[in-house]
Image (cartoon, rainbow, N blue to C red):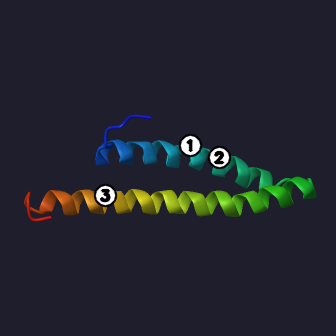
Amino acid sequence: MSDSIPSFSSIKLDLCHMITALSGSRAIVRLLSESDDESVANIAGTALIFVEALHDRLQQLYLDVEACEQRQTSVPHGLG
């Protein structure tokens, strides 16, 4: 891990990669939750709740970082 402070753009890029990967996982878990095997469907259904909540939170974090970036760039230096 680096000692330097990451930029907003690098944080947003990392979040985008995580959201994209999680979207693929969500699609797989959703398919498994529709399985004919009741045990698999039940476990996948529970996992889907977690994966969807995590996906939603990562998307919100992305929006929060974007808002912070915009706020920081709109405040003149020395006043924020």
Query: Which picture quadrant has residue 41?
Result: bottom right
Q: CA distance from mark 2 to mark 1?
A: 6 Å
Read off the residue under disc 3.
66
* Left or right side of 32 for 70: left
Which tag, 2 or 3, sits closer to the chain's start? 2
Compare residues 78 and 48 and report the one nearer the observer. Answer: 78
Position of residue 78 relative to residue 28, above or below, is below
- Tell me the crowding category of disc 2: few under 14, some 14 to 19, or many 20 or more residues within 10 angstroms, Cα based: some
Read off the residue under disc 1.
21
Q: Position of residue 19 (x, y in %)?
A: 51, 49
Residue projecting furthest to the top: 2
* Left or right side of 61 for 53: right
Q: CA distance from mark 2 to mark 3?
A: 25 Å
Q: Quadrant of the C terminus?
A: bottom left
Q: Position of residue 48 (x, y in %)?
A: 70, 59
Which tag, 1 or 3, sits closer to the chain's start? 1
Q: Position of residue 67 (x, y in %)?
A: 29, 63
- Looking at the rendered image, the disc whose residue lies closer to the viewer, 1 or 3, is 3
